[in-house]
Image (spheres, rainbow, N blue to C red):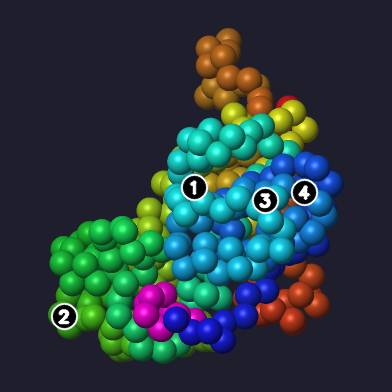
Amino acid sequence: MNQQSIHIPVLLNETIEALQVQPGRTFIDCTVGEGGHAAAILEKGAQLLGIDIDPQAIEVARKTLQPYGENAILINENFENLERICSDSGFHPVHGVLFDLGMSSLQLTDTSRGFSFQHDSPLDMRFSPSQELSAATIVNTFPEAELAAIIEKYGEEHRSKQIARSIVANRPINTTLRLAAVVQRSVGFRGKIHPATKTFQALRIVVNQELQRLEAALKQVANILCLGGRLVVISFHSLEDRLVKDYMRQESKDCICPPRTPVCVCGHKATFKLITKKVVTPSPSEVLANPRSRSSRMRIAERI
């Protein structure tokens, strides 16, 4: 593991304000990572349950949050099991739930994990070593049509068929730099963004079932938040942000019947009110200090 990684939590002041952190209140950080947001919450005198599927992240967070003693509880688990984790830990109801969905510096700079093509790594991309599916398995065994569909859907890459064809023709591909080179040769390099970026995103999302697990977790938040409690989500690409936006909008309405239904038959009742109708984005000064924050988007809802 690269020990030189430096984690800078994005939208930190905005997060503390959005969660309405106060002494004695309780919060859940569903993606505790290296403990940046968590430390800021605990510093205000709150109590925190930190969850992360990545065992390396939990170990780093444990050291970061050690000064806060029993006010910090850390669990190496998947946030899709949110309600059960809270029940097992006796940690509910809570005043705020945070999801910071971005990749951590720890994951991006660890040369054994395969999340980045800035250095050569095995094609892994698993958030947890206990997961069975790796990026190498997808790249080297999935049929060309399925590979193209994954790259198009989860990478929003319109050249997906061309890329998938090239990947299959160049199998086996077992390292990040080789995959990046294969993608680049297939579509060329124009603009500022490396042509393999979207393919890497697509593979990572599928390996870790990111969207399915996020959707499952969001559906549990209302059951663990107290009235007036806040849900805060920071996302880093349009697929995540769209899912969060749609969920918050739906749960802020009483009726979700199709538009032309004459009488409400769904029986749905709003559980949230929107605090932000538009996304909160980082300031120019934050982007300058931390370029990785550039694509971050925050949305906030309050339990009613």
Q: CA distance from mark 4 to mark 3?
A: 11 Å
* Sooner in the amino-acid sequence: mark 1 or mark 2: 1
Report the residue at 72% width, 42% height from top.
26
Side (left or right) of 268 relative to 76: right
* Sooner in the amino-acid sequence: mark 4 or mark 3: 4
* Sooner in the amino-acid sequence: mark 1 or mark 3: 3
Circle 4 or circle 2, nearest the eye: 4
* Sooner in the amino-acid sequence: mark 4 or mark 2: 4
Report the residue at 46% width, 44% height from top.
80
Q: CA distance from mark 4 to mark 2?
A: 50 Å
Secondary structure beneath label 2: loop
Side (left or right) of 65 relative to 150: right
Tell me the chief SS of the magenta region. loop
Q: Residues within 10 Å of mark 4 (few under 14, many from 20)?
A: many
User: Could you say which is closer to the camera, residue 30 or residue 14?
Assistant: 30
Q: CA distance from mark 1 to mark 2?
A: 33 Å
Circle 4 or circle 1, nearest the eye: 4
Q: Residues within 10 Å of mark 2 (few under 14, many from 20)?
A: some
Side (left or right) of 20 relative to 297: right
Q: Which mark is residue 70?
A: 3
Circle 4 or circle 3, nearest the eye: 3
> Which region is colored magenta?
109-116
Task: Report which quarter residue 125 is drawn in.
Answer: bottom left
Whether residue 280 is visible, yes or no, is no
Q: Is residue 284 above or below residue 15?
A: below
Whether residue 63 is visible, yes or no, is yes
**Image quadrant occupied by the N terminus:** bottom left
Amino acid carrying label 4: it is: Ala
Residue at image mark 2: 172
Residue at image mark 4: 46
Q: Which mark is residue 79?
A: 1
- Residue 119, how many percent across, how many down? 41, 89
